Amino acid sequence: MIEVPIIENYTTLPEIITDHQRVIIADNLTAGGTTPSKGVMAESTLYVHDHDGSITFIIKPRQGDYTYTDTELKIMEADLLEAQQLGADEVIFAATTANHEIDAEAMANLIAAAGGMTITLAAIWASVSTPDFQTFSQLADSGVEHVLFDLDTKDQDDWAGFISKASAQQLIPVPVSKDSKKLSAFTAQHHLNLGVLG
């Protein structure tokens, strides 16, 4: 398994990149993670690429849920374009409706703004209705490659169906946990190649 750490801003990047060739960067991790500044994105991307690594940014305009106003969505689109121009390899984001479903229209606009980067759907499943076959199919067709899910919010056995549905649509399910041992054991059990620590 490739373990990908989430870190806050640039501070620990030089230390982390010596042991990990992939890294995720956000701001305000204690509040769930928000978009890092343009300066952080620029310098982090240069540093990681100089060390032959791959960098991912969380794109989220504020802490809290994933139901955004039109203004917040415009901010996200601008941040995605900025990340793209700075050379980011991957971005993580999501948008949901007030009815706890994936916001298809908002996602389409965000995905368009993220052109050229790998797209990963944030771990929204604690607040969104259980995804069905159609949901995963639409995500895959729209260009999403990875879907995150939080091992620390549900019993591990509850994720088996999720993994099966996502994989059937050629999406790559990626578990997230703050517990490295739990993450390692789960990915081995379910034959997953990626895990996010954070």
Image: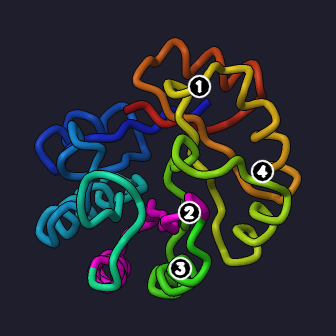
Separation of marks 2 and 4 at Cα, in angstroms: 22 Å
Q: CA distance from mark 3 to mark 2?
A: 21 Å
- Label 4 sits on a secondary structure element that is helix
Q: Taking 181 as reference, is 48 above or below it?
A: below
Label 2 Cα crowd, 10 Å radius (few <14 / some 14-19 / many 20+): few
Extent of the magenta region: 72-101
Q: Say whether disc 3 or disc 2 marks the residue closer to the N-terminus.
A: 2
Question: Which residue is situated farthest in the front direction here?
Answer: 99
Distance in Å between CA atoms under marks 1 and 4 = 17 Å
- The amino acid marked with disc number 2 is Asn
Q: Verify whether residue 83 appears in magenta.
A: yes
Q: CA distance from mark 1 to mark 3?
A: 28 Å
Say whether residue 137 is left or right of residue 126: right
Foreground label between 2 and 4? 2
Residue wearing tag 1: 154
- Across and down, in percent, residue 84 comes to 37, 80
Please report whichever mark, 4 or 3, sits nearer to the chain's N-terminal start: 3
Decide: marks 2, 4 in contact (CB < 8 A)? no
Count neighbours of disc 1 (C-alpha within 10 A) and say few if under 14, some if 14 to 19, many if 20 or more.
few
Using a 10 Å C-alpha cutoff, classify the residue at mark 4 as few (fewer than 14 neighbours), some (14 to 19) or many (20 or more): many
Rendered image: mark on residue 120: none
Mark 3 neighbour class, 10 Å CA radius: few under 14, some 14 to 19, many 20 or more? many
The vertical placement of 57 against 198, above or below, is below
What residue sits right under mark 3 in the picture? 111
- Residue 113 point in image, percent of width and height: 45, 86
